[in-house]
Every structure is written in C-alpha cells, then in structure tokens.
Amino acid sequence: MDCSTIEERSHTLRLILLSIALLLTYGQASAECLTRGTGDLGIIIERAAGSLKVIDRSARSELFHVEGLGDLSHASAVYSRDARYAYIFGRDGGLSKVDLLCGQLVKRVVQGGNSIGGAISQDGTLIAVSNYEPGGVKIFSAETLVLVANIPATQIANNKGSKTVGLVDATDQRFVYSLFDTGEIWVVDMLDPSQPKIDKFTDVGKQPYDGLISPDGRWYIAGLFGEDGLAMLDLWHPEKGIKRILSNYGKGQQKLPVYKMPHLEGWAMAGKNAFLPAVGLHEVLVVEQDSWQERGRIKVHSQPVFVIARPDGRQVWVNFAFPDNDVIQVIDTESLKIIKTLKPGKGALHMEFSPRGEEVWISVRDRDQVQIYDTRTLEQTGSLPVDKPSGIFFTSRAHQLGL
Amino acid sequence: MDCSTIEERSHTLRLILLSIALLLTYGQASAECLTRGTGDLGIIIERAAGSLKVIDRSARSELFHVEGLGDLSHASAVYSRDARYAYIFGRDGGLSKVDLLCGQLVKRVVQGGNSIGGAISQDGTLIAVSNYEPGGVKIFSAETLVLVANIPATQIANNKGSKTVGLVDATDQRFVYSLFDTGEIWVVDMLDPSQPKIDKFTDVGKQPYDGLISPDGRWYIAGLFGEDGLAMLDLWHPEKGIKRILSNYGKGQQKLPVYKMPHLEGWAMAGKNAFLPAVGLHEVLVVEQDSWQERGRIKVHSQPVFVIARPDGRQVWVNFAFPDNDVIQVIDTESLKIIKTLKPGKGALHMEFSPRGEEVWISVRDRDQVQIYDTRTLEQTGSLPVDKPSGIFFTSRAHQLGL
C-alpha cells in the first residue's frame, strides 16, 4: 500500500515534469521567433564587430543582434521576396542568410576570397555574388545557399580571373556586371539555371569599377577608373551594344586627387534628371536622363560619395569623402539649390530612406549612432545606438529591381 | 494517512491538469497565426460573397478565407507599413481591418452609407475614407479604427454633403480628393491630426468623378464627368492652382455611349509617357508627361477600363468594359503596338503585377478563377480557384505612395 503510493507519486511526478518540459518547449518556440509583419523591418551593419542589428523601423527599436558575419567592410544586403530573410555580402567572400523574425544566422557560406556585393534574381530564387578573388560570379539557391552556377571571369595573368564589379539584377531573370581588368560587361540570363546564357560586351572602356541600373531596370551604366566617360548598355536592346556617355565624367586630364571613387549606386534618378557625384570635384552633376547630356553642376561641401534621391524625387541627399564625412547636404531637385547642411558627426557613411520618403536614417560611425531625420522639416527626430554602423537596408528593397 | 494521500493525489492531479491546460494554450497560439514574412502576401476580393482570400504570392496558394466584410463591390484596399494588416474599403461604407498572419477580421466599422475607396497616410498612422453618402471624408486611427477627424464636404441640396471621390494619399501627411457635386479638389494636411488644415480649390470643372496621383506623388489629376478635359494640381506648388489639361479628354460633343467611365487609377505612367483609357472610344491615349500633350492613340479591342503599366514600364496591359470584358490586350510601350491579345474569359476585371514585374494576376469573375501570366512569355503559368474574384492587392503596395 505504501509502496503503491510511492510508485503512484513518482509516476504523477514524472507526468508533471513531462508536462512542464513540453510547456517550456512551446514557451520558448513562441518567444524565440516573432509573429509579426516584416514590411517595416531592416538591418544595420555593424562593420567593426562583424555583426548586425535587426530593427523595427516603425518602433525605431532593435529586435535582434546577430553576430558571426565575418568582415563586413563595404557589406551590402538584399532581401527575400517575403521580406523575412536578409542576404548579406561580406568583403571576405562570406554570404550570410539571416532570419529577421528569429534573429538567427540561418546559413553562411564563404564563396570567394574577396567579394564586392551581390543581387537577388527577379523571381527571388537565385542569389548572385561577384568576386575580386578569384574573380567571376557565383550563383546560389536563395533557399539553401547551395551553388547553382559558377561563372568564371575572363582569365588574366597567372590563371586569375578578372575582378567582377557592379553586379545588379535585371528583368527577365538576368544579372549584369562588369569585369574590371578586361574592360567587359556581361549579361547573364538565368531563365534555365542549369544553362546560364552569357552575353559578353568587350572593350567597354578601361577598368570599369562600379555599375548601376536605372530604377526602371532599362539602363546599365558602368563607371570607368582607367579613363573618363561612362559605358552604358540599353537592356531593352542589348543588340545595340555599349554606348559611351558623359565623356568628361571621371578624374579628368589633370588627374585630380580622388579620396574615394564615388559609388554609382549613389546616383539619384529624380524626374527627368539624374544627379551624379562628380569624381574628385566638389560638385554634383545634373544630367538629363533621355539624352544623357550634362545640364548643370551644383557646388557642394566636398567630394560627394553617395547622392541619393528621396523616393518622390523632390530632394537629393549627399554625403562626402574623408576628411569631410561629418557633413550631409540636401539639394532641392527643382531649384538645384542646397536647402540644408547637416552636421550629423564624423563618419556619416550611409543613408536609407523610408520607402514613402517621410524619413531618412543616417549611419554616423564615429558616434556609434544611427540618426533619424524628418525629410520635410530636415530636423533630427530620433537616434539609435549602434556599434560603428555602416550600411542600413530596409526590407522594402525586396520589391525593387536593382536593389 | 490515507486522507493525506488523497489530498496529495488531487493536488498533483490539479498540477497536471493546469500544466496541460497551459500547454494547449501555447499550442493553439502558435497554430492559429503564422510566423512568416509578409512581403509576398496579398488579398483577393470575393465580391459576391463579401469575403476575401489571403494568398501567398510565391506559393500561389490560399492561406486563409476571411468572411463578413459586407458589400465588396468596387472594394479597394491598402496595407499597414508592416504589411501585416489590410484595410478594406467596402461599398456599404464598411472599413475592415484584416490580420493576414492570423486570417482574422480584427475590426470592422461602418463609417458611412456609401463609400468609394480610401487611403493610408504617408507615415502609416491614419486611414482616410471618402463617402458618397453622407459625403465627406472620415479619418481613422490605423491602429484602432477610432475616428480621428470628420471632414464634411460642401453642402448641397437638402443638407447633404457633396459626394467625395478620387481620394489618394500624398507626401507630407496629406490626403487629396475631389468633390463630385460642387466641382472642387481639397488637399487635407494631417500633420496635426487634431487640427486638419484644408486647402480648397473650387471651380475645377464639372463633376470630377475620379482621381489619380502620379507615382512620384507630385501630380493629382481628376477626371470630369460633366465636361471634357481634366483638372490637374501640382502638389509641389498648390499655390499655382488648378490647371486644365487634355481638353478633348472625355465623352466629347456627340456624347458617345459610355458603358463604364474608365478608372483613372488605371492610368499607366511608363517612361516619359502616360497611357490613358479613352472615354467611350476603342482607344488608349499616349500623353507626354511633362507637357501633358497628346502624342498618339492606340486602337484597341473595345472601351478600355484599366490601363496598367508593368512595373518596369515596358508593357501596358488593358482590360475592357462589358460586353467585351473577356479580353486583355498587351501593348509594347516602345513600339506602341499590341503584342498580344489574351482571352482569359468573361469578367476579366482586375490585374495586379508582382512588384518586380515578372508576373501578373488577373481576376476572371465568371470563371471563379484568378489566372497568373508570365509577363515575358505572355503565357498563362497558373491559376487559383476564387469565388467571383474582383480586386487583387499585393502587400508590396504598403511601400508605395498613392496606392
């Protein structure tokens, strides 16, 4: 009788422990991952620490801190079409897939020795990464990060491939990029992932160092490091070949001291004009989009790095190269006048607009801070502590070509 | 001794039951709502049943079926900035908030007698609804659907307010709409929700019946039912007042039989041209965006209703008024030629493009089907069974002005 009671007790005790164990499991599952919309999420790259913050753009708060992403200098990111996963391209060739809802590094592959950005295919199934070392482009499954296609670049000395740069996604499941050492632009058609079709354009100009695609996905434009001018390809009519535009765009004959070659992603397309950072000059160039003729120059604080349009195209925001990277200037695209000069602090490296343009987030590296500005009042309305912030990427990019 | 054992048993039993109860609670919570990204979700309006389907655009599958939304003829929808909640504007004046992750009607208010669409503010905090009956615009908290501002329209006969139409959101937290009976356009500034500032433009033309805003948010254009021509307002310079454009746009002098006044939201802005459905004619008009001068006309199958641009602007897709609503035509925006005539079936009412433009979803009411087409091959690649489908709205709209 006593024994049976003891057995019973230990039995019921086991039941209780089991129930509680299960309970805890469930409890954790719902605590670890968030059930929420992903339309207003984003990531902020913590360059020095090789980590990132997952942020809630609406609450202006940090949701998760994700570590172990390797060398994130010049890191960039794209998003899955469901806006749940970020793909981060590290300088060390690392490609990392991060789950924004669970704050976890899902998978990381080191796919090259030295990489310089990537893109996601129009249908969201493929991730392409361009490499300095060993050169060439590798294409992975967005789902699994398994290698789908390896596209080596044109060979140069000692069996190395040309550096590849300026990789963007385009319509019809294409990727477009430039070959720095051999002066080429390649268009890769991935409609059949097992049979990439490559369209090669040679002699586009000396040392294409970066590229951009117009927001409508029609124009691919490569900047040239080795000479002045730009190489342009009409992706609606690749058969027409490469066209050279803005023959004065570049370092010029006197070879000005260039502290940092400006980013072409930084080009702002606003209305019928494009706004470009001049190379080595304290100027922003105004170029008519149809004719690609220069229409004017705007004197600015220093050498521009990024020239970015507010989504409605009414303003462009400009940051500058070291040692003047403590200043941001705002240009009115109608009057072409500077309407505000901001001093966010040293290392104002990156700007990201909310998709409807009411605010802009600015990384201020040396203040370990991201500052938030109202684009109507041009006043700071908030800030977030971030360890040496660089790139800021909002999930609304998931729905835009070429981002 | 025995008693104590009994007490003990009943005590342990209570513990077990409690644990299991808690366990079930957790179990349900994680079963009812989905933990997933919301970037590739959407809703399809089931007009006759007053219900909608929540769909996964990537999997092309139904996630939830939500009922009890009232009269959904001409229903439209907008999304919260986190892309979790859809706000549906019903013809019966009902405003419904639906949770896409849990498949639940969160709240429904009947805010007017007869309503005709709405908009969400730039910052995502306010929902505006325009009404036929009693006329005027009501503005609600996006969070709670509590009334924030009631803006009656200009009075007409027997204490009624003018019908309000063509409501859109604009930059700087503004809403813009037209007053049908009194021929006005109002711009409402909601920067201070407790103090709406109203800018009224009178004598804009006879009976504005619909309006649109250009994708960059700069131009508000109202169509006129009572006379030819269109009323345009430059929202960058409201002080310049209303400008009349396209003086021949409308029913014309001979008053053609018009089966359905075309929707202005249907205007396609592609490159430097806008493509407009002609009124009463079997034509699509090509208009230059800067000058707003007509540049050409494209003969089409019948009277166009919606003329919608693929996101990259390379194609416009056109559907037609009864009895020719079984046909869809695709126009190449470069050659201005019809490149395909599709026969999806009777009641091809609405088209929605994926944000990067690779596919378009078409509601085919009389086949109880939504058909999916590849915009490159122009072939059907899938379909979904839907009860009398009408409007299709993807969550990527959350990030676009004027949608």
Image (cartoon, coloured by chain):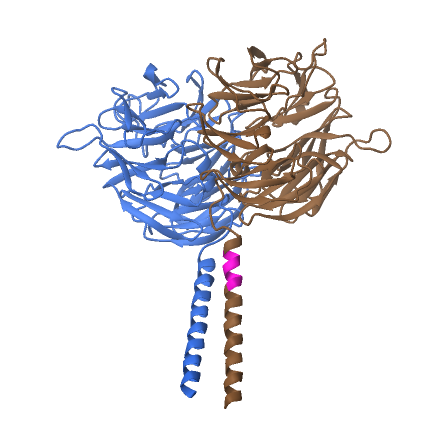
Chain colours: A brown, B blue
| Magenta highlight: main SS | helix
Residue A278 within the segment the image draws in magenta: no
- State the image coordinates of residue B107 (x, y, percent, origin top left): 32, 49
- State the image coordinates of residue B156 (x, y, percent, origin top left): 17, 29
* Range of magenta residues: A24-30
Asked if residue B238 is positioned above or below residue A179 in the image, the reply reads: above
Q: Residue furthest top?
A: A254
Residue A29 within the segment the image draws in magenta: yes
The residue shown at (37%, 24%) is B220
- State the image coordinates of residue B261 (x, y, percent, origin top left): 32, 32
Give whichever of B328, A285 is nearer the camera. Answer: A285
Q: Is residue A274 left or right of residue B320?
A: right
Quadrant where the C terminus of chain B sits is top left
Determine which quarter of the picture holds residue B224: top left
- State the image coordinates of residue B28 (x, y, percent, origin top left): 44, 62
Q: Is residue A343 left or right of residue B139?
A: right
Give whichever of A277, B46 is nearer the camera. Answer: A277
The residue shown at (44%, 65%) is B22
Give whichever of A357, B400 is nearer the camera. Answer: A357
Q: Is residue B302 visible?
A: no
